[in-house]
Amino acid sequence: MAKRIKMSPYQSWMTNVKDFINHIDIQRISGIRSILGIDISDNHVHVVELKRRGSILNKFSGRFEVMKHFQETLPGDLSATERGVRLKDLIAKHGASARYAVGAISSLGVKTVTTPIPTTIARIDEWIKDNHEKLLRVHLSIDLMAFSYEILAQDESMRTLEISFVKKSEIEDYRKLFKAAGIELFALAAGARDAVNALVVSTAKLGDKRFLHFDDQFCTITSFSNGKRIKQEQVSTESRPEFTDDTLGADSGSIILAGLVPEGFKNRDYETLKPLNLPTNHTLAVGLAIKGFLSEISPVNFLTHFERDRLSDRLHKSLTARAVLALGIVVILLLGMEVMAKTLLQSRIEALDEMMASGGADIAAVQALDKKVKTFERNLAGNESVLRRSTFARILHDVASSAPDSMWLYKLQIKENEGHNQEVFIYGFARSDESISRYLSQLEVIARPIGVELLHSGSGHGADDIVQVKSTLAQMVTFEIRAVFSGN
């Protein structure tokens, strides 16, 4: 069992970033809205234009919408260039707007082989070159062939490869064909392998299925096990025109038909694939269009590295131009908002100026009243000392007028506390405690203090401030009273 390597936090973060970037729909951001899938051979042409819907942040979660689909039968003796011209006229006739397409080489020069190889082989390309004659079972120089492969399965010891071989002359013919049609290719596939893409998108659970796709000359049989594609083989419909459940190695319930299905199969109890509700003969064209949107679904591509790089550069230039345009629009909008804000502010200021000009008399009256209020406030601030003196005079008058004849006052203290109230301490002497009680009562009635209390009363002996006028007078009673008057 292989040992799992624990990734560092940085490696994990980088993996998540790469995964997020790989999910972004660069094509849609670059302005590509639809792609053509073109299934063209010597005898027929099927074209489907697909558009992808969904979030641009996850290209794998979108759905496909059919924009156009059409077909035409071709004479078998046309050259590649002549077929390209017929294709160009057909696309213009039906009004397909897509600028990019994915095509497939459909000819006798295509051969697909499934083979296992050890995982110890690091350079797969060199291994295929060294073993191509064994794989093809013919003596043919590798210089005349081109190949592309994908890995179907892999474990610790073995890989399962699906290798597609195509004659270079066939690739050149199809390059001329699409050039004459005025079409820019995203990818150039081979054979009917990409018909499986339409099956994968259209079927929720594949399980153990046999998928049979028919074209003019071959039946391509793709085998699935537990939903995974494990094998593909091509069978000539001429050398083996009859297929039975035994020869296919499956019961009728697990067989799916697609493409140019022969009449003999239509009467059997087999499921027929209708991708995206289109006729089954458009299956390969639908799969090719899907390949254009999701190149990861099928890596086989016979375009040269130069052609792929040129297409990638064009997409990135388009993406950059759109990003610059979007940034320019944002800047223009921000500047426009600033101009609008300044214009609005200026209009408000002008409206206020007009209002002030129309109501000049009222404004002058308000300003004059404001000056009078400020003058009055200054006068009040300057007369605080006068008001304070008036308050002291009232307190002295009330304290003195409340005293009975049998009482004498010799000291008075006035303090202003935190609440701006006047706290008054009254010192004096009386002939009796009864005189002090009568004075307290008179003080509450006449002076109306907030509070009044007797702090001290007693004999006059020892008091420095008491002077006895006559020796015959009885001993006096001294007292200290505290009274609080409101400062208002």
Image (cartoon, rainbow, N blue to C red):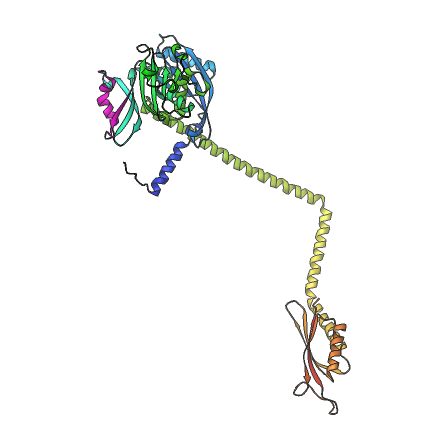
Query: Can I make out residue 216 in this image?
Result: yes
Was residue 115 drawn as part of the magenta stretch in this picture? yes
Closest to the observer: 116 or 247?
Answer: 247
Image coordinates for residue 198, horizontal then vertical, percent: 40, 21
Is residue 358 covered in magenta?
Answer: no
Q: Quadrant of the N terminus?
A: top left
Residue 364, placed above or below residue 218: below
Report the quarter where the C terminus lies.
bottom right
Depth check: give the residue in front, 324 or 277. Answer: 277
> Image quadrant of residue 83?
top left
Above or below, 389 against 20 in this view is: below
Residue 179 seen in this snapshot: no
Residue 277 spot, x, y in % from top left: 46, 19
Q: Nearer the viewer, residue 39 or 218?
A: 218
Q: Position of residue 61 (x, y in %)?
A: 43, 29
Residue 415 pos. (x, y %): 66, 73
**Residue 467 vertical placement versus 305 (above, below):** below
- Range covered by the magenta-colored residues: 111-139
Residue drawn where x is 68% and y is 84% of the image:
458
Q: Looking at this view, name the residue that lies furthest to the bottom.
A: 471
Quadrant hosting residue 463: bottom right
Q: Residue at x 22, y 19 (%)?
A: 134
Q: Quadrant of residue 247?
A: top left
Please give left or right for residue 467 compared with residue 16 in the image.
right
